[in-house]
Amino acid sequence: MLIHKQFRFEAAHHLPNVPEGHKCARLHGHSFRVTVWVEGEVGTESGWVMDFADLGEAWAPLHDALDHRYLNEVDGLANPTSEVLAVWVWERLARSLPGLARIDVHETCTSGCRYEGPTA
């Protein structure tokens, strides 16, 4: 069974590695949406895979680190593409969320990425 919880944060960034003249090289912001997915068995007594409140607690320190920040200044996000951000989130949640299955990052209503963990 897969469960998910969606989180939002506002942040600014620029992409330092894009070709010269690319619009994303300029400072700009997004209303980011991150969906955290956890996979596991439904507990016979609890009836759930995980308490959604536990997902929120795991996310809280990341929200504090990202919300209303300049992402390029956040440790590990010097080139804060959606892809890099998805891996960054995974690395910080994997320790506290057994069964972490995927991270979805949307930087706009129509653009985003999905990360399903490191490949073997």
Image (spheres, rainbow, N blue to C red):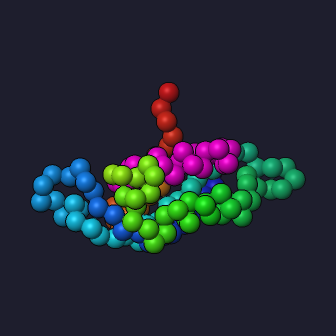
- Image quadrant of residue 98? top right
Residue 109 picture location, percent across and down: 37, 69
User: Which region shows up in magenta?
Assistant: 80-103
- Image quadrant of residue 4? bottom right
Question: Which residue occupies the extreme top position in the image?
Answer: 120
Residue at 66% in and 63% down: 56
Q: Nearer the viewer, residue 88 or 37?
A: 88
Q: Nearer the viewer, residue 42 or 21?
A: 21
Tell whether 82 sits left or right of 97: left
The correct choice, above or below, for 71 with respect to 87 in the image is: below
Question: Which residue occupies the extreme left position in the image?
Answer: 21
Question: Which residue occupies the extreme right position in the image?
Answer: 45
Residue at 72% in and 64% down: 53
Residue 100 picture location, percent across and down: 61, 46
Residue 19 picture location, percent across and down: 15, 52
Q: Nearer the viewer, residue 65 or 94?
A: 65
Residue at 23% in and 62% down: 24
The correct choice, above or below, for 94 with respect to 74 in the image is: above
Residue 54 picture location, percent across and down: 71, 59
Tell whether 83 sits left or right of 28: right
- Image quadrant of residue 26? bottom left
Residue at 34% in and 70% down: 29
| Observer able to see residue 35 | yes
Question: Residue 11 magenta-drawn?
Answer: no
The correct choice, above or below, for 3 with respect to 56 in the image is: above
Number of marks in the image? 0
Q: Nearer the viewer, residue 4 or 63?
A: 63
Question: Residue 86 magenta-drawn?
Answer: yes
| Observer able to see residue 39 | no
